[in-house]
Image (cartoon, rainbow, N blue to C red):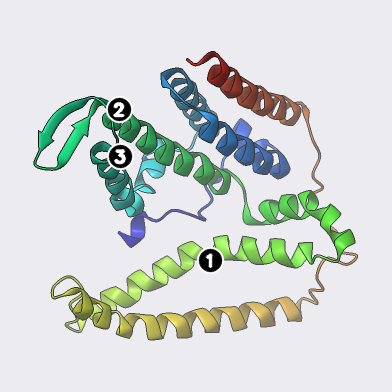
Amino acid sequence: MLKDITLGQYFPGDSVVHKMDPRTKLIMVVLYIVALFLADGFAGYAVMILVTAGFVWLSKVPPKSLFKGLKPVLIIIVLTAVLNVFYTDGTVLVQVWKLKITYEGIIRAVFMVLRIVMLICGTFLLTYTTAPVALTDGMELLLHPLNKLKVPVHEMSMMMSMALRFIPTLIEETDKIMSAQKARGADFETGSLIDRAKALLPILVPLFISAFRRADELAIAMESRCYNGGAGRTRMKQLRYERRDYLALVFGVLLIAGMIGLQVVGV
């Protein structure tokens, strides 16, 4: 299960999405999420499915990797579908005791599952196609106006980027510790919920120690390279908007306008 968590991983490539400015991709993710929550009805979800599939095709990220990232949240997806099926009022199709399956509940469950799946796949494309350094630069430039309010924009962007960067590392470290504990006879899959929670203690202690050690080594490495925050700091690669970035932003605005239009029409 741990190996299925792909958040924070970066897949190098030369696709159109990889070449886009990180600021554009950050804005597009926000516009995509807004459009996804504005989608209502068959037409709206059909449009969002086509848009999501188009982004995946343009990014050249293997769909297998996206679906692999859905495994850790499979329980949430199933639970959401079940709750919507049984607790939505409408035309009753099947009734067993007090549980009722309605037509509206089935439609709502399908829409909610699609929304969650597309939300995860769409947001995962940001980290899949953007290097951590580029993501930090893009986030810092977008939030740069907050510097006037004494907000430590550079430090915030750096911390968020590092958090995403080290998620795969911590997952790999956890998997190694669990394998080592299993080789020593530890059992994480049987017993009551309390027993399983107690069995995780031998994992959490070395994991926290490893995380603090990595953080200390990173701090020493940054200090030895005379790292000094964002004041007067330059970049090896300057970010510049190109034609594809403007076209992407226009598409994002049109997508939201289209979702609003479908709501008004009631399709």
Neighbour class for label 2 at 10 Å: few (<14), some, many (≥20)?
some
Look at the numbered discs 1 and 2 and tell me whether their residues touch, using CB distance below 8 Å: no
Q: Can residue 147 be seen by looking at this rendering? A: yes
Q: Which of marks 1 and 2 is nearer the N terminus?
A: 2
The label nearer to you, 1 versus 2, is 2
Estimate how packed mark 1 is, as few (under 14), some (14 to 19) or many (20 or more) residues with alpha carbons within 10 Å: some
Name the residue type under label 3.
Asn
Q: Distance between the residues labelled 1 and 3?
A: 35 Å
200 horizontally vs 228: left or right: left
Residue 166, numbered circle: 1
Describe the element under mark 2 as helix, strand or loop: helix
Q: Residue at position x 50%, y 79% from top? A: 211
Q: Distance between the residues labelled 3 and 2?
A: 9 Å
Q: In which quarter of the image is residue 34?
A: top right
Whether residue 71 is visible, yes or no, is: no
Q: What residue type is labelled 1?
A: Phe
- The residue to which callout 2 is attached is 104
Q: Which residue is drawn at 27% across and 28% down?
A: 90
> Which numbered marker is on residue 115?
none
The numbered mark, 1 or 3, whose residue comes first in the sequence reads: 3
Please give the residue where the numbered disc 3 appears in the rendered image.
Answer: 84
Q: Which residue is drawn at 68% across and 56% down?
A: 133
Q: How many marks?
A: 3
The location of residue 206, given as percent across then percent down, is 40, 84
Residue 81 % position (x, y): 29, 41
The reply to whether discs 1 and 3 touch (Cβ–Cβ < 8 Å) is no
Tell whether 99 sits left or right of 72: left
Q: In this view, does 127 lie above or below 1?
A: above
Give the residue type that dot 2 points to: Glu
